[in-house]
Image (tube, helix red, strand yellow):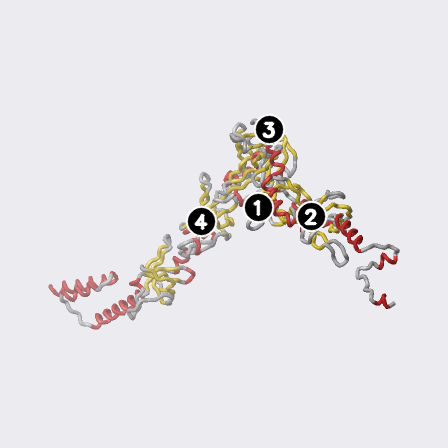
Amino acid sequence: MENLKNVAPIEDFNWDAYENGETVTSASHEDLEKAYDNTLNKVNDREVVDGTVIAMNKREVVVNIGYKSDGIIPMSEFRYNPELQIGDTVEVYIENQEDKKGQLVLSHRKARATRSWDRVNAALENEEIIKGYIKCRTKGGMIVDVFGIEAFLPGSQIDVKPIRDYDVFVGKTMEFKVVKINQEFKNVVVSHKALIEAELEQQKKEIIGKLEKGQVLEGTVKNITSYGVFIDLGGVDGLIHITDLSWGRVSDPKEVVELDQKLNVVILDFDDEKKRIALGLKQLTPHPWDALDANLKVGDHVKGKVVVMADYGAFIEIAPGVEGLIHVSEMSWSQHLRSAQDFMKVGDEVEAVVLTLDREERKMSLGIKQLKSDPWETIEEKYPIGSKHTAKVRNFTNFGVFVEIEEGVDGLIHISDLSWTKKVKHPSEFTQIGADIEVQVLEIDKENRRLSLGHKQLEENPWDVFETVFTVGSVHEGTIIEMLDKGAVVALPYGVEGFATPKHLVKEDGSQAQLDEKLEFKVIEFNKDAKRIILSHSRIFEDAAKAEERAEKKAAKKAAPKREDAPSIQNQAASTTLGDIDALAALKEQMEAGKK
């Protein structure tokens, strides 16, 4: 026992093996560990190695790298490669040789990212075709996962055809070529279109080499624009201009064709290098003018739709590709300058009369006013001289008012025929454009299609009455309503106006009469034909003073003794009126008797 106390325990004794009845020495145990280690790969953390897929499901991929444990990688890291299967070799990044559970931690995404930049540059240099996973849409294109790098796929590089729905590509794995790398910003641009252009280029050369004018080919509508339609002829694009889609007018090419539609087209022209190819669709059908009714003639009525409007007229399509022009002058019997838009608009269905028809020139003129009778053919019956009507004021001139009694029947009211009493300087003082006015027909000018009308003639001429009221010498109260250089306009009773010159506006105190002043005026001239009344305020007190002076002289003459000298006779004769002839004769007899 004492000897046992002095024996030291074996530090690395394998008790598990002892309990199982196994007896292994330290040396043999080390040999076994070395032999086992030699069967495993030597790996280091943060190292990229190749591994083999040994199992996989929808969520995970199990990869064996020859280590004592296998690594598990999420399936999402392999979504760029939907063809992955058991037995494939994949690159993995060793994040940790053993986590808390003793599990090997691997990452395929980091492995790709570690080598990605070198692989992308190599792919560009070698024009290598690579695979990428389209992750999402972005402005102008798509984001593609290439070797773990987010590369940009421009919308124009997805396909040779314009892409209308980008969303259908999201989540797809496609083949690409690296077309551009920005080393400074680590930007990568890829293209799918570049893969198929080479093949299309060969097809394009074959097609272009066979092109001829007049040749009819089948094509597919590739793109529709406002000015025409691009047609894919099998790798070669041609354009059908909007004017070559249909014999009729086309406002939007979508009215005629639709995307991806297959149709026959004819080659109209191409440049020397055959890069621009002009195609036609309407040329495959006969011209509509050739199919126009042979019995159609001038004077016939036709129906059609307004397809184009202009100020000077409207184009009416009576059949697809067959149009006629209705000039604005043929839209109404009225001679007022008006725009065609006043009568119709695009899309209106109208009936018209054929005025001219030239089948060789393929031109036709139409009219709609001819659907109504010309009002001037029966003008004397409908608007005889002296008849009264209601007209619409259309326009003013300095000399009168142009009115329209009905469409096509115009007349002029001279400014002097607007009012019996008011002196109208401009028609706008009397009425306004668009207003109704009562008129009477004075004259008919059928040749020039114009009526002479009057407004004042609807009332009796008040000047017949004024002639008895405003007699020369009569005095009336008036108000100065306008001051002019040559005198003043005076408003008199009954709405009549008179005129007074400046010398007749002097008041008794020597001052000049002013605007809006109310005074007594004497009529010194009345002209019925000229409708003129000349007035004087000054004449009132001047005539009163003269009358008073005459009365004083007459009284003085009666009171003074009679003298028979010549001067007395001369003065008496000078002041004598025609009514004193008898007195002069008596005086003469007295003088002759005295001499005897």
Q: Position of residue 392 (x, y in %)?
A: 50, 50
Q: Find the distance from the CA under tag 2 to the CA under tag 1.
A: 27 Å
**Mark 2 and 3 residues: CB-CB less than 8 Å, in contact?**
no
The reply to whether residue 562 is in sight is yes
**Mark 3 and 1 residues: CB-CB less than 8 Å, in contact?**
no
**Mark 3 and 4 residues: CB-CB less than 8 Å, in contact?**
no
Q: Amino acid at mark 3?
A: Glu
Task: Give the residue number, with chain letter if any, for mark 1.
Answer: 181
Q: Position of residue 82 (x, y in %)?
A: 72, 44
Q: Residue at x 36, y 53 (%)?
A: 530
Mark found first going from the N terminus, 2 or 3: 2
Q: Is residue 195 left or right of residue 450?
A: right
Q: Position of residue 340 (x, y in %)?
A: 52, 43
Few, some or many residues within 10 Å of mark 2 (<14, 14–19, 20+): some
Does 182 appear above or below 550?
above
Few, some or many residues within 10 Å of mark 1 (<14, 14–19, 20+): some
Task: Give the residue number, with chain letter if any, for mark 2.
Answer: 49
Task: Give the residue number, with chain letter if any, for mark 3.
Answer: 206
Q: Is residue 87 left or right of residue 518?
A: right
Quarter occupied by the C terminus: bottom left
Mark found first going from the N terminus, 3 or 4: 3
Mark found first going from the N terminus, 4 or 2: 2
